[in-house]
Image (spheres, helix red, strand yellow):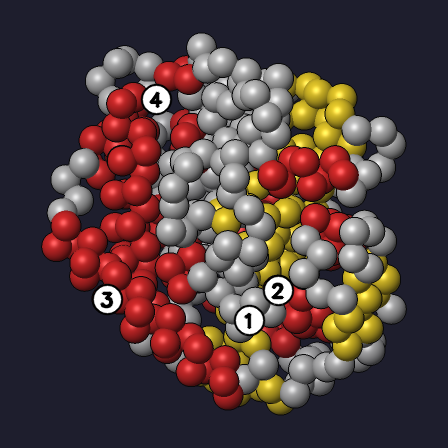
Amino acid sequence: MAILTSILNMGQGGKRVVVKDTIDIAGAPTQAASAALAEAAPASAHAEIVSRTLQAGYHIVGKANLHELAFGMTGVNGWTGTPENPNYPELIPGGSSSGSAAAVAAGLADIGIGTDTGGSIRVPAACCGVYGLKPTFGRLSRNGVMPAASSLDCVGPLAGNLQDLIDFMGAVDPAFSQAVAGSMSTLGVARVSAESIILEGLEDQLSRATARRMEVSLPLMDEAFQAAMTVINRETYLACEALLGIGKLGHDIEKRLSAAASTSDGELAEAEQVRHAFTSEVDTLLARHDYLVLPTLPHFPMTVREALAGRQDLNISLFARPFNLSGHPALSIPLPSRQGLPVSMQVIGRRGDDAGVCRAGWQLIHQGTPVETTFQQGDNHAAVR
């Protein structure tokens, strides 16, 4: 099955987890779904996130497929195959954590561990109709994750329900939260341009919110998207340049990686200036509002047929990628499908307030229900009531 690159059986009992194949599992090669890494030697040790997952009592059932080298947004892969989107079979599963999202949506796993450098957890979560969290940058260790160095990439979970996602975060990160309780008082609704059906779905959900809503703007959103593209291009090129020209990369990756080689030091310096300015912009809004909300996707995913014909769509990450640049936690929440198409909402919180983002997400999908979330250190049992 194209959703998984290998079947594993690690850990005893517990909920099932699939691990994106950019994350080391001892005894298994980390191939990043690329023929260029087909001969990679088995990893000698677990990535830290894998060790923590097993220590918390979860059961790892396989390594998940992805967009090659985690450097694309469609999830299409000519070498390992393209994971089917279980809930929307005609549409792409999204990338790059396509297999992680598809495995959860298909019921093959309770948790998918993915990575998010430019929306690579939230975009496939939105495409497949599941939950996906990009934690605050640096919250979950990237030790044992490729590429080894990144100023954008975050390890995070995908799940079919928010309770499982919260449980997992509390289990693998004791600092996630010991006790979080309360309710939102103010919500900043970001003014963005998106397909009308998506905006209508978001408004339907928010219209039942008990928090006071205010429309807010993020003037640097487009610049932050472009700056994040500049940073990922430079950092991915530096990590993968040795794979260029050997004839083993997919055409789309070879082309994009070659283009990334031309990223200049001046462009990178400008991107860093935008990073600082956009981060300040978001921090300022979050000083006035408890959380920000906006759609996860600006438009609906393309069809698999279009993607297989060579169409690319990096702009599908227009609302996700800027928060990789700023480092804020971001949760993608599936909303009721409209016209048979996936609709999702993104909740953004203050850096370090990952548990609060999950609490806000819970309140927004369980309108009027008080929430009290307690996480016990070293345990994978969380109660939300």
Residue 348: in sight, yes or no?
no
Nearer the camera: disc 2 or disc 4:
2
Q: Do the residues labelled 2 and 4 touch (CB within 8 Å)?
A: no
Graded by Cα atoms within 10 Å as few (under 14), some (14 to 19) or many (20 or more), the crowding at tag 3 reads few
Residue type highlighted by circle 4: Gly
Residue 181: in sight, yes or no?
yes
Residue type highlighted by circle 2: Asp
Real-space CA distance between mark 1 and mark 2, rounded to the nearest whole angstrom: 7 Å
- Residue in the picture at 67% in, 66% down: 355
Q: Earlier in the sequence, mark 1 or mark 3?
A: 3
- Residue in the picture at 27% in, 57% down: 226
Mark 4, secondary structure of its residue: loop
Q: Earlier in the sequence, mark 3 or mark 4?
A: 4
Whether 237 is drawn above or below 121: the answer is above
Residue 113 horizontal/vertical position (percent) = 62, 40
Q: Are marks 3 and 2 in contact (CB under 8 Å)?
A: no
| Nearer to me, 356 or 299 | 356
Q: Give the residue number, with chain letter if any, for mark 2.
A: 354
Graded by Cα atoms within 10 Å as few (under 14), some (14 to 19) or many (20 or more), the crowding at tag 2 reads many
Q: Give the residue number, with chain letter if any, for mark 4.
A: 250
Q: Give the residue number, with chain letter if any, for mark 1.
A: 349
Q: Give the residue number, with chain letter if any, for mark 3.
A: 273
Q: In this view, does 5 lie to the left or right of 149?
A: right
- Residue in the picture at 33% in, 20% down: 249
Quarter where residue 235 is shown: top left
Nearer the camera: disc 4 or disc 1:
1
Q: Do the residues labelled 4 and 1 touch (CB within 8 Å)?
A: no
Q: In this view, does 13 lie to the left or right of 152?
A: right
Residue 275 horizontal/vertical position (percent) = 31, 65
